[in-house]
Image: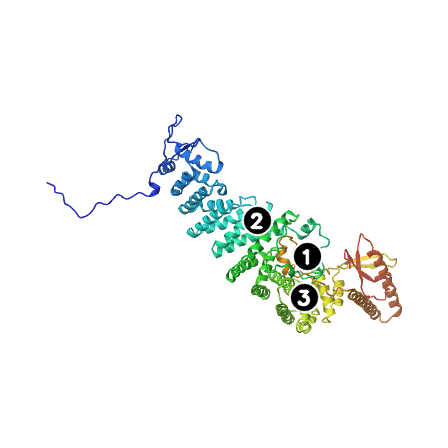
Amino acid sequence: MASLVATSETPRPPQAKPEFLTPRAVPLSRKDGTPFGTPSPSSTSRATINFVEVLSEARASRTLSEKYRLIVASVKFIHTGVKPPQLIPPLQLLNELSKMTSLLDGFNEMLVSELLKCKPLTLEQEVLKAYLSVLVELGRSNAFHHEEICRQLLSAMASIDTEESPQDRLDLVHGAIQRMLKELPHFQDALLKQVSKCLPFMAKPWQQQVHMYRQMLRVVDYVPAQLALEVLARLVHKIIDLDCHCPKEEMLAAEDTAEEPVTQFPMDAVPGDSGASGKDESDTASPAGHPPTAVDTSMKHPLGNTLDRLMELFLEYINGHMAELDDAKATYRRFLAVFDKYIMATYKCLHIQFLMFYICSKRPLFADHLIDFLWHKVQNPNTSVVFRQMAVAYLGSLLSRAGYVSVGTLKDTLSLLARFLHGYLAQTSSAHSLGVDVNRHATFYAVCQSLLYCVAFRHKDVVASNGGLDFLRGLNLEQLITSPLNPLKVMSRPIAMNFANVSRHYQIVYCHAIIERNQRSALPMAQVGYGSHGDQITFGQSSQYSTVIESYFPFDPYVLTRSQRFIAPIYRHYVDHLSTPDADEDDNADEDDNADEDDAEEIDTAKEGLGGRTDDVESGRRNIEIIRERISTTSTSPEVPVAMSVTSASGSLGGQTAEKLLSYSVSPGFVR
């Protein structure tokens, strides 16, 4: 007989099933809004749906049951607004789906696809919260959907076509992104892939562009530091593409202000700038140090207007992150990294680099660091020549154009540049035979051009400082100018001429004679002689073509109208302090004297070559006058402008008359 043994153990209560496995009755609604459970003659469906059973059955059997079709139709109603005969209320539907996202794979991808077609910002706030909860849970349960979810969230930010945006709903979208970044580390990769894809094309309306970039800058503020740098880099890279599609000449022509081409010195005037006339534009800043109020104007150039609006957005973003030192440093480091990787590597971008120009104006520490950063690139032999040239171009342009760069910083940097050049000459002269060679000495010429550019641009500030004139003379510029490398020969002519005027005014070095000699020697030479009957005889063409180094200075005048309010108060325009009538007359007189001296040298050379025969010399002089008359007659033709330089008669005439073999050089298309 079996006996029952009592034990001290109490029976365990039955464990509760997980919530997502617990069948819940979800009331259905008819098209008229009445609950589906109420009696109706046309009602044939059940009053409740067990989501776990329906989704599991669909995944296992790969068949679409009536209840499954009802769920899909209810999801479609959320993004299409087309109400099916029977409907599960959206809020209840989304709440149920958020609890069983682990079942939304395989065959249920069709349901996921319908979920991702919704437009979040069109939903009511409570429904939007439930929808975003579904997306977050879906990302947690399956990493395969990360890119699709990220694309859905970023596309929601770009779906606003007007300036009025539902800020409360955007806050919810940003909150969902923050949750996924915090809980799902791999979501960062998906976000980085989708940023560039979700940015609007450059031809889209500027309102849509500004709205999307504003939201992405907000993303930069709350993502991890490295991800923030990568996102910012992609935003700036897109603006660089836009900047390269907005030539300055086209924008000026669209504004009907393109009176003259833009160059380094004489053409600094741009619309709305009074700095070209010598007026200090720092007075336009507000007393609190903030930029002036934006002018409600739009540029006529479509892409230029979009670029202007985006530059204004980024400058406002920078201005808003400069109050606290730590935040300012973090912002500076991000933009410096982007500047180094993308902006400096872009050939002749026009406006995007002014982001760094503006950041450096906020704190002297930033300006000094950028100057030091550029200078280390210039003198680093491991840096490619192209980047060394670009770095020194940015350095020279920053020193010249930035109103916040002090004279002390300018003088210190000019001393570094001059010391580098003199050291280069000393090292090169001991190893190679010196001569004009742009390919071999590209860095030397670029540094020399930036040095002379800064001297010509800010000579008045330097001379007005304590010991300024002695400082200029201490740079020993004469040794650089008269060196065998002959930098004036390959330098941009406007820079060379302006420096020549400045150096002559302060009696530092006299460059005009060197420039004129370089100009003659750099002409392409077509050797032409005259026979006994005055017929032209072409002997051949020499290869004396001059090579001029690139004269790109990144901080040339800023022409965007709306965002100019940030740049104008800190920008220095060129003022020609030496452009006076007396100075012009002196220049012309010196040029005439130089020309007379050159002619005298040519006649003396001819006399020596003829062994002192006065008759032949006089005959040569008369032939020179005849040739000059022909030159003046030919050069006045409006169709074929030419310039000719007389070559001296050599000592190898061998008794022949100078009339037969005297030659001159022809340079078609060159206008002196």
Q: Judge left or right: residue 303 versus residue 35.
A: right
Res. 458 mark: 3
Amino acid residing under circle 2: Val
Res. 111 mark: none
Picture coordinates of residue 569, whole percent (x, y)? 63, 60
Which is nearer the N-term, disc 1 or disc 3? 1
Q: Judge left or right: residue 530 versus residue 370.
A: right
Tell me the quarter of the picture where residue 100 sits.
top left
Residue 201 visible within the image = no
Picture coordinates of residue 343, whole percent (x, y)? 58, 56
Which is nearer the N-term, disc 2 or disc 1? 2
Q: Nearer the viewer, mark 2 or mark 3?
A: 2
Cα separation between marks 2 and 1: 26 Å
Question: Which residue is more in the foreground, 572 or 236?
Answer: 572
Tell me the SS state at disc 1: loop
Q: Are marks 1 and 3 in contact (CB under 8 Å)?
A: no
Q: Judge left or right: residue 618 versus residue 581.
A: right
Which is nearer the N-term, disc 2 or disc 3? 2
Amino acid residing under circle 3: Arg
Q: How is the image coloured?
A: rainbow
Tell me the quarter of the picture where residue 504 sits.
bottom right
Q: Which residue is disc 2 drawn over?
A: 210
Amino acid residing under circle 1: Asp
Res. 273 mark: 1
Cα separation between marks 2 and 3: 38 Å
